[in-house]
Image (tube, helix red, strand yellow):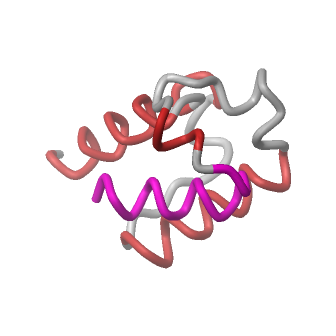
Amino acid sequence: MKETVFKILETICEDNIVRTNPDIDLFETDLMDSLGFAELLADIEDELGVIIAPSEVDRHVISTPNKLIAYLEERASL
C-alpha cells in the first residue's frame, strides 16, 4: 500500500519530495490543491479500492504522506 500511495502522490504533486520527505505538508507547501485532493481520493479508490468521500475526512488528517498512509492502514484494519 505504501508504495502505491507514494506513486499516486508523486504523480499528483509532480515531485518526488513526497517520498524523500514523507512528513511534508502537501497543502501548506502548495504541492496539492483542492483539485489534486479530489484526484487523490479518486486514485486511492481506483488503485487501492478504498472509497473516501471528501466530506468523510478533514484534509489535516491526511495532509502529509505519512498521515495519509497511517489513515489508510487504519481503515484497512477495520
Point out residue 40 in the picture as x, y percentages from the top left corner.
Answer: 63, 58
Q: Nearer the viewer, residue 68 or 29?
A: 29
Q: Main secondary structure of the magenta part?
A: helix
Q: Nearer the viewer, residue 20 or 5?
A: 20
Point out residue 58 in the picture as x, y percentages from the top left corner.
Answer: 62, 29
Residue 18: which quarter of the image? top right
Q: Is residue 6 magenta?
A: yes
Which residue is the extreme one toward the left?
77
Point out residue 9 in the picture as x, y percentages from the top left corner.
Answer: 58, 54
Q: Quadrant of the C terminus?
A: top left
The magenta-colored residue range is 1-15
Q: Is residue 37 magenta?
A: no
Q: Is residue 33 left or right of residue 44?
A: right
Q: Is residue 61 left or right of residue 2?
A: right
Q: Residue at x 58, y 25 (%)?
A: 24
Q: Is residue 78 above or below residue 49?
A: above
Residue 25: which quarter of the image? top right
Q: Is residue 58 left or right of residue 7?
A: right
Point out residue 19 in the picture as x, y percentages from the top left corner.
Answer: 47, 43
Q: Residue at x 49, y 70 (%)?
A: 45
Q: Nearer the viewer, residue 28 or 55?
A: 28
Which residue is the extreme one toward the bottom?
46
Q: Quadrant of the N terminus?
A: bottom left
Q: Is residue 49 above or below residue 5?
A: below
Q: How many marks?
A: 0
Q: Is residue 49 above or below residue 54?
A: below
Q: Is residue 58 left or right of residue 61?
A: right
Q: Residue at x 66, y 42 (%)?
A: 55
Q: Residue at x 36, y 41 (%)?
A: 69
